[in-house]
Amino acid sequence: MANPDIRDLLIEIGTEELPPKALSSLSLAFENGIREGLEKAGLTHGALRRFATPRRLAVLIENLLVRQPDRQQERRGPALSAAFSPAGTPTKAAEGFARSCGVTVAQLQKQETDKGAWLVHFSHEPGAETASLIPGIVDQALAGLPIPKRMRWGDRDDQFVRPVHWAILLLGDEVIPATILGVATGRETRGHRFHHPEPIRITAPMDYARQLADAGKVIADFAERRDRVRTQAEAMAAELGGTAVIKPELLDEVTALVEWPVALAGNFEQRFLEVPAEALMSTMQDNQRYFPVVDPQGRLLPHFITMTNLESRDPAQVRAGNERVIRPRFSDAEFFWNQDRKQPLAARMEMLKHVVFQQRLGTTDEKSVRVAQLARVIAEQTQGHSDSADRAARLAKCDLMTQMVQEFPELQGIMGRYYALHDHESPEVAQAIEEHYLPRFAGDRLPTTATGRIVALADRLDTLIGIFAIGQGPSGAKDPFALRRAALGVLRIMIEGGLDLDLLALMERAAGSFEVMIRAEHAVDQVFDFIMERLRSYYLDQGIRLDTFEAVLDCRPTRPLDFDHRVRAVNAFRELPEAASLAAANKRIRNILRKVDTVLPFAVRPDLLLEEAEQALAGQLVELSSEVIPFMEAGLYGEALNRLARLREPVDAFFDQVLVMAEDTAVRDNRIALLNELSSLFLRVADFSRLQD
């Protein structure tokens, strides 16, 4: 038997075609806005399900309370000492509070707690009908959607991302009467624009998706529709003897463009396959929203798959139209490919002298020269090939001057590799031209070649130093030169790419390549700190605790790969049973050393070690130092810390049995020197006093 206190609720906003790239985020934000509104109103409910198509945003709420629970309100007034005179008569404060509550002083109650006594007023507030609250909740959710620029339509003042044509607020089998964005609510939705443009009367909220699919030729659920798009594309590609290339972002965009997806294959001339596949695929994916098809070896086939939004009675005509649209773009790419190869890539170096990188930092050619100089330095320090690094750096930006890249900017670097290979540059140089742009975004792949890593690192360091030197570093959310991304790229290349380099020294070298008036050397410390902030985020994203990072940061290692080895070692050390005790001991030692206002002895004097516990600690320290310092110097911090864990018992015994601040000054200083040696040994890895429980 149905529960009369709960009903399902359907909310739908029908619009003109919504922006496809924003549809998924709009749908999620709308669902979240509705959920927050219901929670704020105290309306409990079951599952929420969101729907999104090019012409609608909808949310289905199951088992929603039809009425707010009644609430007991407590309002606290003045303290009893201020509410009544010594004679017990009400003061003006008590009378004013009573009037504000709509009662007399006699109707107020007294409340006593261990923190004092007050006058209070208790009132019973009956819950509102859910139907009366929903329009306001919907309005708030719509107002909170992430819409950069809202538009007006007709002669109304209502604003939304697209004009609104219908709205549904259906609670159970009853419509909630309201006006949403200028449209009166009802229970009628619209089906597919071509297959079923007539209204569809929704009988019940839970029937919404089924009715739209069966009668309206609309798959309202975004995830279900995306699965259909993927499944159809994969099946059709298999029929063609290949595999569909389905990028997640393109899949989402195509899903947001159709309400009733129907896959259709198209073909293009075999001769176009002589053009680099990336250019053809870029046109298919970015311009036409087609899925390319590749063979089992990953080579492009002369086919594509498009997703139409209807079941055509003449699919051949639709196919021909899609093939006709793509042919001019392919012809352009073919023309640019042939024209660009008429002169070598190196011939475009001269053209870079007329392209400004940044007004105060000079031309792109000047930047290329600086990057080449720094790349040579890095190559020498990493046993790389200096000539290859220099050549790749000088050629890295040349493809910006080609017709292909000017038409398809997303192919920069990729086309440079093709043109370099055509010019018989070494494969290492050609690959580095493409890879110096990697990683392009968070989580992107890294350069795979040594020269690619070297040039990618040099290019980013030059940009970071130069832009900071002219005072154009990021501010707030603004980062026009993508310096945060560049800094993270530097770190990933050095850490994940295994480049054991001194970052600070490299930045000083990079700063020395700029004109004297830039005074780039003054930006080095600022850029180093900026990169360390990115390193903080890098580790937090991996689940490394903040205090672990800060313990290593306090030692200010300047080699990111070494920094990483320390962080990993400290993180593993924390799992040892001895870790908490030794971290606490380090805190205690640091506090003692901060209070020392005399110069510490150069070394511990064995003749002043009077207590057995301090003798044991000193002996263990001497033995372990000779054992662990070679590990530390080799960067094997985990091995070193595993051995240092053996200090737990002698350290605990020392603090239990030895008075550090002895009356005898020489003894006291000797004990402080012992603790200083202990602390210094741990500080070769990190400041363990920074570790929290």
Image: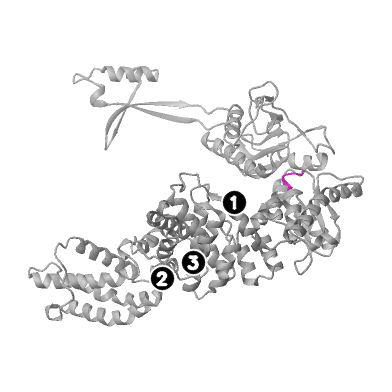
Mark 2 or 1: the one toward you? 1
Neighbours of disc 2 within 10 Å: few (<14), some (14-19), many (20+): many
Residues at circles 2 and 1 in contact by the CB criterion of under 8 Å: no
The correct choice, above or below, for 289 with respect to 505 in the image is: above
Quarter-of-image position of residue 278: bottom right
Marks 2 and 3 sit apart, C-alpha to C-alpha, by 18 Å
How was this image coloured? one colour
Q: N-terminal of the two: label 3 or label 1?
A: 1
Per the rendering, the mark at residue 354 is 1
Q: Position of residue 240 (x, y in %)?
A: 85, 62
Give the alpha-carbon distance from disc 2 to disc 1, as whole Å: 50 Å
Q: Amino acid at mark 2?
A: Ala
Magenta stretch, main secondary structure, is loop
Residues shaded magenta: 254-258
Q: Earlier in the sequence, mark 2 or mark 3?
A: 3
> Would residue 126 appear left or right of 245 to someone viewing this image?
left
The spot of residue 573 in percent (x, y) is 38, 70
Secondary structure found at label 2? helix
Rendered position, 208 above or below 604 = above
Toward the left, the furthest residue is 664
Label 1 packing within 10 angstroms: few (<14), some (14-19), many (20+): few
Q: Disc 3 marks which residue?
A: 494
